[in-house]
């Protein structure tokens, strides 16, 4: 039996202290131990991106990160981006521009898109396609996902301009 480690994670602004086995994946800690079920378990090989979360200032696939590697990190999941009463502009854009169908990939798509827009607030269509390439969708054909990300970028940029 492996020795458990004390780790601290701040997930969506809430600090959690817990014991984790060295081999325990972050996705399992989020879903099974912290009951944060927005990130989905898809391929468990980092190919699909359904488990994408933001850790620090990078989007990561939480199925390939050990919880111990995330010790001390600040993590944002889809639940931390908006709420049912106050959707994040990406959530609103995905809804408005039909950027989702079955919804399985959507939390990872939106979380990746949020980090993409932090890194590049005014991307071109090509930059969105490249930046989202690590997240797979079996339903939409990507056209509406790209439209949604571009629409959210425009909304976020106009909000910034209005604030200035």
Image (cartoon, rainbow, N blue to C red):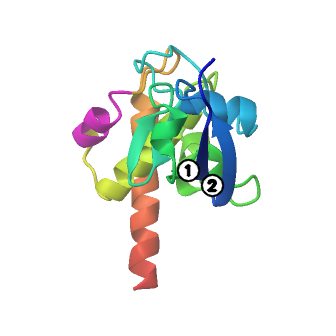
Q: In x, y percent, where is residue 33?
A: 73, 34
Left or right of 123: which side holds 104?
right
Q: Residue at x 55, y 41 (%)?
A: 94
Q: Which residues are magenta?
A: 126-134
Q: Which mark is residue 38?
A: none
Q: Which residue bears the numbered disc 1?
A: 76
Asked whether the residues under the numbered discs 1 and 2 touch, taking CB atoms below 8 Å apart as contact, a structural biologist would say yes
Q: Nearer the viewer, residue 63 or 163?
A: 63
Determine whether the residue tagged by mark 2 lies in a helix, strand or loop.
loop
Left or right of 146: which side holds 92?
right
Q: In x, y percent, where is residue 10?
A: 60, 55
Residue 106 position (above or below residue 85): above
State which quarter of the image contains the N terminus.
top right
Which is more N-terminal, label 2 or label 1?
2
Q: Which mark is residue 12?
A: 2
Q: Which quadrant would residue 42 be assigned to in this image?
A: top right
State which quarter of the image contains the C terminus.
bottom left
Label 1, label 2: how many angstroms apart (C-alpha)?
A: 5 Å
Q: Nearer the viewer, residue 54 or 156?
A: 54
Q: In x, y percent, where is residue 90?
A: 52, 50
Q: In x, y percent, where is residue 122?
A: 29, 57
Visible in this render: residue 38?
Answer: no
């Amino acid at each position: 039996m492996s020795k458990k480690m004390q780790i601290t994670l701040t997930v969506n602004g809430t600090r959690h202290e817990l014991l984790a086995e060295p081999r325990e994946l972050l996705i399992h800690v989020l879903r099974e131990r912290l009951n944060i079920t927005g990130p989905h378990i898809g391929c468990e090989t980092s190919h699909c991106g359904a488990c994408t979360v933001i850790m620090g200032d990078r989007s990561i696939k939480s199925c390939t990160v050990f919880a111990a590697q995330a010790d001390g990190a600040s993590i944002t999941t889809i639940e931390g981006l908006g709420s049912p009463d106050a959707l994040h502009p990406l959530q609103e854009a995905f809804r408005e521009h039909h950027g989702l169908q079955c919804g399985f990939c959507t939390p990872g798509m939106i979380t990746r898109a949020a980090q993409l827009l932090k890194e590049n607030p005014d991307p071109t269509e090509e930059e969105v396609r490249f930046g989202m390439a690590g997240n797979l969708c079996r339903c939409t054909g990507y056209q509406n996902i790209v439209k949604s990300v571009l629409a959210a970028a425009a909304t976020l940029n106009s909000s910034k301009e209005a604030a200035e």
